Image (spheres, helix red, strand yellow):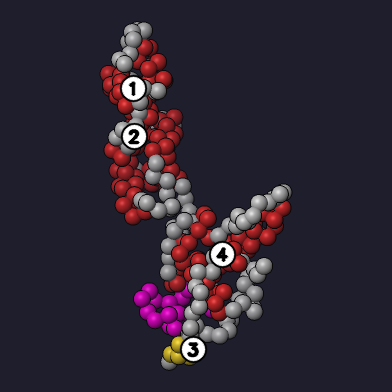
């Protein structure tokens, strides 16, 4: 198998055209340090297309040139940009995983699972988990900016694979904030979760725990009752109601 074949060659054929600077794409390439020097134009362009689609970027993310300018004006051979140097490391990593680690999997079923750029990146240049991205915003910019960041990411990426917009990442991040002594952040995150998960009992049950941590028994009870009304299997919310009401039966 040719090196990096698992990088999804998405370009079936790319005819070259004559420009003022010569033929583009060229028939041969310079400054190849990871890909084999005998790589074909079709395979190299397919690999680059895999980068672009996997990371959600364009050629000038890695290569020296002006965005929107003709491709024949881009200096593809230059190593001046850090992302290009990083990309070489990523190529070697992908090749090592596919050629070494996955090859050692016993009784490996067909067709073989392979790692590609999009396996981790899923359309974003920095492949962070949603909870990690929001945690960074909380630490650097505060709650309001974090809530807006979530809305921006959701508007742009919802329906794709870049981030997990299900309920649990927000709930877990809120729990982490509460345990770290930042219950106000937790409340804001859970209110955001309730907005996008209006029928779930998990979010109000977790919010009840945060209200309890803040010493607001009335709001805690209201949240636990809301959780049970939405999901009767929220046993912990039922228990909390009993504890807070002196053993009385919670509403059914």
* Most foreground residue, 42 or 237: 42
Say which mark, if any, is on residue 228. 1
Distance (Cα) linking label 3 and label 2: 57 Å
Image quadrant where one finds the C terminus: top left
Magenta residue span: 63-77
Q: Earlier in the sequence, mark 1 or mark 4?
A: 4
Of tags 3 and 1, which is closer to the observer? Answer: 1
Q: Secondary structure at mark 4?
A: helix
Could you tell me what secondary structure mostly forms the magenta stretch? loop
Image coordinates of residue 172 in percent, x first then y, are 43, 35
Distance (Cα) linking label 4 and label 3: 26 Å
Say above or below: 8 vs 191.
below
Q: Earlier in the sequence, mark 3 or mark 2?
A: 3
Provide the residue designation for mark 3.
Answer: 23
Q: Secondary structure at mark 1?
A: helix
* Most foreground residue, 76 or 82: 76
Provide the residue designation for mark 2.
Answer: 190
* Most foreground residue, 210 or 7: 7
Distance (Cα) linking label 2 and label 4: 39 Å
Of tags 3 and 2, which is closer to the observer? Answer: 3
Say above or below: 218 vs 20.
above
- Position of 147 compared to 77: left or right? left
- Residue at the image position 31 percent from the left and 48 percent from the top: 151
Q: Earlier in the sequence, mark 1 or mark 2?
A: 2
- The reply to whether discs 1 and 4 touch (Cβ–Cβ < 8 Å) is no
Provide the residue designation for mark 4.
Answer: 7
| Residue 175: quadrant of the picture | top left
Of tags 2 and 4, which is closer to the observer? Answer: 4
Of tags 1 and 2, which is closer to the observer? Answer: 1
């Amino acid at each position: 198998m040719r090196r990096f074949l698992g990088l999804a060659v998405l370009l079936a054929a790319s005819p070259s055209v004559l420009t003022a600077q010569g033929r583009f794409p060229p028939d041969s390439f310079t400054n190849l340090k990871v890909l084999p020097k005998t790589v074909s134009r079709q395979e190299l362009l397919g690999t680059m297309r895999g980068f672009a689609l996997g990371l959600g970027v364009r050629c000038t993310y890695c290569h020296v040139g002006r965005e929107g300018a003709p491709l024949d004006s881009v200096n593809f051979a230059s190593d001046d940009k850090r992302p290009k140097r990083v990309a070489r490391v990523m190529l070697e990593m992908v090749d090592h995983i596919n050629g070494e680690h996955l090859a050692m999997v016993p009784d490996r079923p067909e067709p073989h699972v392979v790692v590609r750029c999009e396996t981790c990146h899923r359309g974003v240049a920095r492949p962070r988990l949603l909870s990690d991205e929001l945690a960074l915003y909380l630490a650097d910019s505060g709650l309001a900016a974090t809530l807006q960041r979530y809305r921006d990411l959701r508007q742009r990426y919802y329906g794709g694979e870049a981030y997990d917009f299900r309920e649990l990442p927000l709930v877990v991040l809120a729990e982490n904030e509460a345990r770290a002594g930042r219950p106000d952040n937790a409340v804001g995150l859970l209110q955001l979760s309730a907005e996008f998960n209006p029928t779930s009992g998990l979010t109000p049950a977790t919010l009840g725990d945060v209200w309890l941590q803040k010493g607001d028994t009335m709001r805690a009870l209201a949240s636990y009752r809301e959780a049970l009304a939405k999901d009767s299997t929220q046993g912990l919310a039922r228990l909390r109601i009993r504890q807070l009401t002196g053993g009385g039966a919670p509403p059914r």
